[in-house]
Every structure is written in structure tokens, then in C-alpha cells.
Amino acid sequence: MNAPFGRGTGGGATGGGFAESQAPAPGEARATYTGDLHAWAREQAAQLRAGRVAEADALNTAEEPDDVAGAQYDKMESALRVLLTHMLKWDHQPERRGRSWEATIRTQRKLVARVLRKNPSLKASLEEATDEAWDDARSDASGETDLPLASFPEANPYDTRRSKS
């Protein structure tokens, strides 16, 4: 059996699938952007490294940096959501505070700081990402604590600078 993350043959770090990809030879079938994104991306990278720019799928290749930028923003927003959810739980259920919540708050603060350190231009989007994460964090905290949504402030009371330190 060759299940994901299993011990079967033909996969994993040494059994194939992670080897250096090569672009198809002329006339061979090519992976498509909408069909197999992973194979397509590997082919595009191989073509560009080989200097075969004219053969690359320029339109879709040009979209990928935007997708990468969006993924970094989403990573920051997701960490803010988890951080804010746990800060709300910490503040609204002091009797349930524990090391797990404290560790989650610490970990998510570090993650936000790391994303910002690796992507300094995202600092300009921190307030926007925090605002987007806030409503979800309120809802998540309400669901996880069984407290009514109205128990949590509509406006974010936390200092954004504190969230990343």
C-alpha cells in the first residue's frame, strides 16, 4: 500500500516524487496549469533554468508571484486569527487559562513576527489583516467557549504592535 506518509515504496523523501523535475522533451505531453499545478510548476522552473524562456507558460507563470504574495498574507492573517481567538479566550475565561493557551499565544506571536521579518512589506498590511482576522476570531472564541458572540467586543481592543512581539 502506498498511502500518504506511509512506509510504502515509490513515495516519500527518497522513493520518488521529490526528485529534480525536468521539462518534457519537445513533442511530449506537458502538464497544464489547471490540470496538475505541481507538475506544471516544476516544468516551468526547469524550462526557465534551462534558458528556454520562449517555451514557458508566461501568462500563468507571471501569476504565480501574486499567488505567493497572497499566501504570505493569508499565513499572517491565519496566525492573527488564532492569536486573537486565544487572547479572547484568555481574557474571557480566566478560570480556564492554562499552559496550552499560553503556548498558543506565544507561538502565534512568533509566527506573525517571523512572517513580518521575512516579508517586511506586509507590515503595511498588518492592520488590514488584523481587522479581517478579528471577526473570525470573535466567532471562533464564541464557539470554543460557548459564550455568546455579544460577550466579545465588536472592536479589537488589542494593540497590533503587541500582537507581533
Image (cartoon, grey):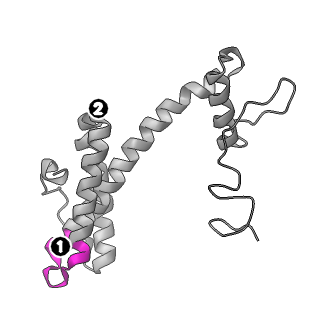
Q: Quadrant of residue 29?
A: top right
Image quadrant in which the N terminus is located: bottom right
Q: Which residue is mark 2?
A: 121
Q: What secondary structure is found at the residue carrying circle 2?
A: helix
Question: Residue at 69% of width from left, 40% of height from top?
Answer: 39
User: Looking at the picture, how far across and down is residue 7, in whole percent?
Assistant: 67, 69
Mark 2 residue type: Ser
Residue interval drawn in magenta: 88-101
Q: Quadrant of residue 151?
A: bottom left
Mark 1 residue type: Trp
Comparing 86 with 44, the one in front is 44
Question: Residue at 79% of width from left, 30% of height from top?
Answer: 24
> Which residue lies most toward the front here?
14
* Residue 165 at least partly seen: yes
Task: Tell us which disc is closer to us: 2 or 1.
Answer: 2
Whether residue 93 is in magenta: the answer is yes
Q: Which residue is mark 1?
A: 90
Question: Residue at 37% of width from left, 42% of height from top?
Answer: 73
Whether residue 99 is in magenta: the answer is yes
Comparing 156 with 38, the one in front is 38
